[in-house]
Structure formats: structure tokens, C-alpha cells
Amino acid sequence: MAKFLIGLLAGLALAFLSAVVVVVGVLRLGERPPTVPARGILVLELAGEIPERAPFTIPLPFFEENTPLTVSDIWRLLRAAETDSRIKAVALMPGGVRAGWAKLQEIHADLERLAKTGKPVAAYLRSPSAREYYLATAAGSIGMPPEDLLDLKGLRAELSFFKGTLDKLGVQVEIEHAGKYKDFGDMFTRSAMSPETREVLTSVLDEIYGQLTAAIAAGRKRNPEQVRAMIDEGPFLARQAHAKGLVDSLVYEDQLFEDLEKRTGGARLGRVSARDYLKSVSSRDGQGGPNHVALVVAAGSITRARETGLEQDAGIQAPAFVRLLRQVGEDAAIRAVVVRVDSPGGESFASDEIWREMNRLSRRKPLVISMSDEAASGGYYISMTGDPIVAYPGTFTGSIGVFFGKLNLRGLYDKLGVKKQLITRGRFAAIDSDYEPLSPAARQKLREGVDDNYKVFVEKVAEARKRKFQEVEPLAQGRVWLGSQAKRLQLVDELGGLDRALELAREKAGIPRREAITLVVYPPKRSLFERLMSRPTQSLAPEWLRTLLETWPLAVSQSGGFMRRMPYWIDVK
């Protein structure tokens, strides 16, 4: 009976999969390239996450429409719109954007550049937060509904501490770290911020707030002091925002498009979505000539996880990413490489494997590092090739430090009535046991490893940045820096985004400015069929759950080594 049920379920699953493949095939056969009107408005709607790496795609209209555009997608379509005579205006419509400040700075700069071509760029906001309003300041005009709220009231940073909860559970987290700012374990071992944590977060908040007020001041023709005074009065009802000059008009969506038509000559304009326009642009890919530049995306936590079949969907897995770098290095058609890093770091030894292959790639191809929202700890480590590093003012970087953590669950086991007995051979055989605390000798053993790992990290930074160890070490200590601070400290070379990184890659490869380049993104997008044909992994879990599991100390204790990772999540709201 059991075999019959298994066979029946397998048959049903196969039939369902076959039906999906047939439907997808039929849809693909009947799919026509999107049509861009001769006189059109490009509608750029942004919501939720804006990833660096392309998510897997489901080739059905509803799912495609809800698949987020990547940073490079947005960059590409806005670049194309600059010179496309069919695009007469752009309507920016952000809502519920959850991207980091560095990605927002990339899109802001891209919109500013497009606006300078003379094409009208109008922003339309619905219940905007500071993130959406920041993007809108790049537009020539900002509108919002008459009955709405502009939630612009400043910024805050929050830290949660779990020591009290863990004490009640009988769980002890033991952390050894190098660098006084490498405070990863504080959320589990303290009940409040350390002076060092408060120092760093205060510095970060001041810097981002300064960048935000400067952007608003430039976009709204005010000075930063006036903007700070206005923000202190927020949030604003729509009419209050209009009276303060924070928005230009209180209109409904149809009125916004009518106004854009008037500003472009009065004739009716067709609307083209960002996704359809991107497809139109992508259909012309390959016409940029033989100058291929690879954009290699390194996004997510760094691990040493083995082959899973879904390695592209599960952060930066060292074996798969090393293989990808080798593929790019061996491709004779690739003239230069930009590695786009968006990573908080991760496993120490996995970071070192990737660092090695990055340096090998640097010897084969002209290489430039482009940092996204975060390129910290292991993410900064893999960037140490000696090649130019371009970061945004709002990039989280640095965090040059190392930690090791383990869980002692004995108190929890006692509460549950669980007993363990250990028989060991070897002085430190139980050093990673979840039933024994660290002895002084075991702690010293770990201390030696952490300190050595830290020393190697600083040495590699010093060598890549062409500085002395004694100059770099005071800037290390596990401290997180913003890109604007890192530039002043010479931890990065320039402030900028994809444009500047590509300019540097072009210069290093000797590609004349008059010659076009074709950007080739690695890893490429994968379809639903390709994913279904792969073995399942933990990457099938929701993003929030994967992030929690990566940060929870159990992940540390199971990773089997030292960690080069950001000390905490930083999400300035």
C-alpha cells in the first residue's frame, strides 16, 4: 500500500511538473517583444527589496511583473532612456522601498543624470518614508495625493538585546573577538550598548543624516540648516508638506500624467513600464560591440557550503563563487571586470578562498571593486586585491575584525530534563561542545586563533592598500565605517557608483571612451524550470528567516570556524 501511495504521489508530481513545462512553453512561444510607444513615459515603480543579484524568474505574467528589478537593471534602463528619443519623460513612483542607503544613492544619481538631459522627471509619492522622499529629490518635480502623509521625521537606529531572554532559557553565548568594536555577540551577552557600539552608531547616524539633509537641500533649493529645521517638524500631512515646499503639487495620479504631457508638447504619451522597457533594451544587448565588461555580483553572507544545485540563490558560497570567478577569468571575450560586493561577510576561511581567487582574477583581467549597501568584514576582506575600490557615501564597510562564538545549552538542557555525558580524548576535544563552558585554557586556545586571524586580516588590508600595518590597525578593531568615512581614511579609493566603476574599468582595459561597452552580468538569471531541476536547499526559506538563522548564534557554533562578519544588522530608518 505504501509503495502504491508513493508511486501515485510521484506520478501526480510528474504530471504537474509536465503541465507547468507545457504551459510555460506555450506562453513563451506566444510571447511577443514589448512595444515601446513612439512617444512614451517611462514609469519606474519601485517597491520592496532592490537586489543586486537577479532572483529566479517564473515566466508567467503575474510573477514576472512582481519580480524585483536589480540595481544593474535600473541602471541599464535609465541609461538607455537618456538617449532614447521615444522616451519623452519619466515618472518615478516609489513605495515601501526597503533598499539600503547605498543602493538608493545609486538610483538617485542615475535619476539626476537623466534629469540633466532635459527630459522631465516627475516623482509621485504615496505615503512616502524618508527613503522614498530621498529618491524623489532627484526628480524635477514632486507630487503626492492631497490627502496623504509624508513620513519625514528624521532617522533612528535601534538595537535589540536578548541576554535576558537567553538567561531565562538557560542559554549562554560565549564569544571571543579581536578588535574592541567587533561586538557581534553583544546582543546575546549584554543588556545595553557598550560605549564602543554607541560611538559607532552615533557616528553612522550623524553621517547618513548629513547625507540625507544635503540631498534634500540640493533638490529643494534650501540650505541644510533649513532642511534640519523642517524635519524637526515632521511628519507632515500632504498640505503641510506642500506649504513647506517639500512637494511641488498635490495631485492625483492621472493629473500627474496630464501635466507631463503638457510639459512635453501636449500630445498624448503612452506609458511603458520599467520591466517592458528593460526587455526592449535587453533585446538590443550585444550591439554594444566587442568590448564586454563583466559585472560579477557577490551578494549575501559568505559560507563554505558545498554544492547544492541552488548555490546562486544562497549567498556567496565559496566553491560556486570561486568557480564563477575562474569562468570569468578564462573568458577571452571579457576585457575587464567589475566585482559588485554586497556582503556583511561570513566564514573566515571561505572568505580567504574567495580572496585568493579574486587576486588571481586581478592578475588576468583589469579589475575594479564596486561596493553596494555593505562590503564589510569578510565582504571587505575579499575586496583586498589592490585594485581600485569605489563605494557610495552610504556604504557600510570596514569592520576589519574576527570573532568566534559558541553556545552553552547546559542550562536549557537541565530545564528540559536532558542530560549529556562526555567521554573525551584530547585536551580540547570538547572545546565546541554545547554542554560545557569554555575553560580558561580553551578560551586561550581560541584567543590565539582569533588574534592570528585578525593579524592576517590587517596584514592583507595593509598590503592591498599599500600602507603600513601600524597605519591600518587603529582603523581596524572591528569598527564599521560608512563609505564617506572610509574614503577619508583611505580604506576605499573613490566615492561613486556603477558609472564610476565602469569608467575605471574602461580606463584600465584601455577601451576608448567613444567605443560602447556591453555589460555582461554574472551569475545570469535562472528560470523556474532550472530551479525546479536543482536539489532543494535552505535557500527555499523566506529571506527574513535565512537572515535570522545566519545571525543567530547557533549558526556561529555550527559554522566550524572563525567569522569575519558585520557585528550587527544596521538598518537606519
Image: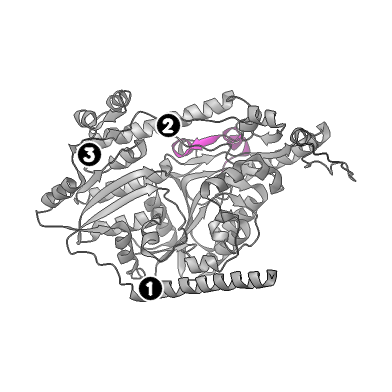
Left or right relative to 266: residue 107? right
Nearer the observer, disc 2 or disc 1? 1
Left or right relative to 242: residue 507? right
Sequence order check, earlier mark of 3 and 1: 1
Check disc 2 and report the residue beneath it. 207
Check disc 3 and report the residue beneath it. 145
Sequence order check, earlier mark of 2 and 1: 1
Q: Mark 2 Cα within 10 Å, few/some/many (few <14, many 20+)?
A: some
Q: Is residue 478 above or below residue 116?
A: above
Give x and y (percent) for residue 186.
62, 31
Check disc 1 and report the residue beneath it. 28
Secondary structure state at the residue bearing disc 3: loop
Check if residue 12 falls in the magenta segment: no
Please state which of residues 517 and 216 is positioned toward the viewer in this rendering. Answer: 216
Give x and y (percent) for residue 379.
56, 47
Nearer the observer, disc 2 or disc 3? 3
Check if residue 480 falls in the magenta segment: yes
**Observer able to see residue 462:** no
State the residue at coordinates (53%, 57%): 313
State the residue at coordinates (69%, 40%): 404
Residues tagged 2 and 1 counted as in contact (Cβ below 8 A): no
Identify which amino acid the numbered label 2 is placed on: Glu
**Segment colored magenta:** 466-486
State the residue at coordinates (58%, 46%): 345
Secondary structure state at the residue bearing disc 1: helix
Q: Quarter of the image containing the C terminus?
A: top left
Identify which amino acid the numbered label 1 is placed on: Arg
Alpha-carbon span between mark 3 and mark 1: 39 Å
Alpha-carbon span between mark 2 and mark 1: 48 Å
Q: Is residue 375 above or below residue 218?
A: below
